[in-house]
Image (spheres, helix red, strand yellow):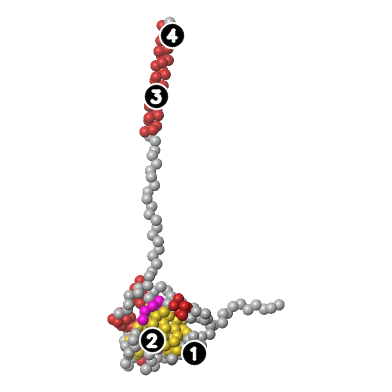
């Protein structure tokens, strides 16, 4: 009987030890359990900034500085016109350009006709063939210079020097119109496709528009405009 009681006591003690060990093992595993860290905050990427044209009205000293940048002292603003300068995005690159009416400065005609000027002399009333015959600036010419904007500062920028110098297209009542306004005013007509804003004016008794397309400036007269024929592949008929 004593032997059996001792054996029972030993078994009971072993059972208690096993249970205690199991409990300690569970607590230890819980203490060592790795806690997953919450993901770090990742801000959404900023939306790309769209450059908005600078629409602050031009001031005369700024315009004079832009003219000197391109023409040095060879040309000056013709103040007999009102307005004598306009701003708009004339070539459609989302940068503001400057259109300013000029005349050759006294005794500077040679500089205006130098062999390699920093501007492109054009006459929008002439055909391409006539343009290639050569153009010159005359003593009494009234010219329209369009200085294209560059970078964040538009036509104010020191590197804004790309300039078209246009002959025979300075009229009266000059104003800037958007392409949308142009299309609405002539709905139903066959129209050119300007790349940016247009300059509306009265020229030689006709109301028309000066516009930029295909890397050059052209004149639109609603009475005489004929769209250019579209060129394409010619297929022979078998």
Q: Which residue is mark 4?
A: 4
* Mark 3 residue crowding within 10 angstroms, few (<14) / some (14–19) / many (20+): few
Q: Could you say whether the residue bearing mark 3 is in a helix, strand or loop?
A: helix
* Mark 4 residue crowding within 10 angstroms, few (<14) / some (14–19) / many (20+): few
Which one is earlier in the sequence, the residue at label 4 or at label 1? 4
Judging depth in this view, the residue of 1 and 211 nearest the camera is 211
Which one is earlier in the sequence, the residue at label 3 or at label 2? 3
Closer to us: mark 3 or mark 2? 2
Q: Which residues are magenta?
A: 86-91
102 vs 217, left or right, is: left
Instruction: Give percent across and percent down for residue 25.
Output: 39, 28
Q: Which residue is mark 2?
A: 173
Closer to us: mark 2 or mark 4? 2
Q: Are marks 2 and 4 in contact (CB under 8 Å)?
A: no
Q: How many marks?
A: 4
Looking at the rendering, in which quadrant would you find the C terminus? bottom right
Q: Could you say whether the residue bearing mark 2 is in a helix, strand or loop?
A: strand
221 vs 68, left or right, is: right
Q: Could you say whether the residue bearing mark 1 is in a helix, strand or loop?
A: helix
Q: Which residue is mark 1?
A: 130
Judging depth in this view, the residue of 25 and 89 nearest the camera is 89
230 vs 132, left or right, is: right
Judging depth in this view, the residue of 118 and 226 nearest the camera is 226
């Amino acid at each position: 009987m004593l032997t059996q009681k001792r054996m029972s006591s030993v078994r009971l003690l072993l059972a208690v030890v096993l249970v205690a060990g199991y409990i300690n093992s569970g607590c230890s595993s819980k203490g060592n359990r790795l806690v997953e860290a919450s993901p770090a905050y990742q801000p959404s990427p900023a939306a790309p900034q769209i450059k908005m044209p600078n629409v602050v009205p031009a001031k005369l000293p700024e315009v004079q500085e832009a003219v000197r940048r391109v023409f040095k002292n060879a040309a000056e603003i013709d103040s007999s016109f009102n307005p004598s300068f306009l701003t708009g995005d004339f070539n459609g690159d989302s940068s503001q350009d400057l259109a300013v009416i000029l005349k050759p400065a006294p005794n500077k005609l040679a500089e205006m006709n130098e062999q390699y000027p920093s501007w492109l002399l054009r006459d929008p009333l002439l055909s391409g063939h006539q343009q290639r015959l050569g153009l010159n600036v005359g003593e009494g010419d009234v010219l329209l210079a369009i200085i294209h904007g560059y970078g964040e500062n538009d036509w104010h920028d020191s590197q804004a020097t790309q300039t078209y110098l246009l002959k025979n297209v300075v009229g009266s009542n000059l104003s800037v119109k958007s392409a949308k306004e142009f299309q609405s005013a002539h709905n139903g007509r066959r129209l050119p496709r300007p790349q940016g804003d247009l300059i509306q004016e009265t020229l030689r008794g006709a109301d028309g528009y000066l516009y930029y397309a295909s890397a050059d400036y052209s004149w639109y007269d609603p009475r005489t405009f004929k769209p250019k024929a579209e060129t394409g592949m010619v297929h022979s008929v078998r």
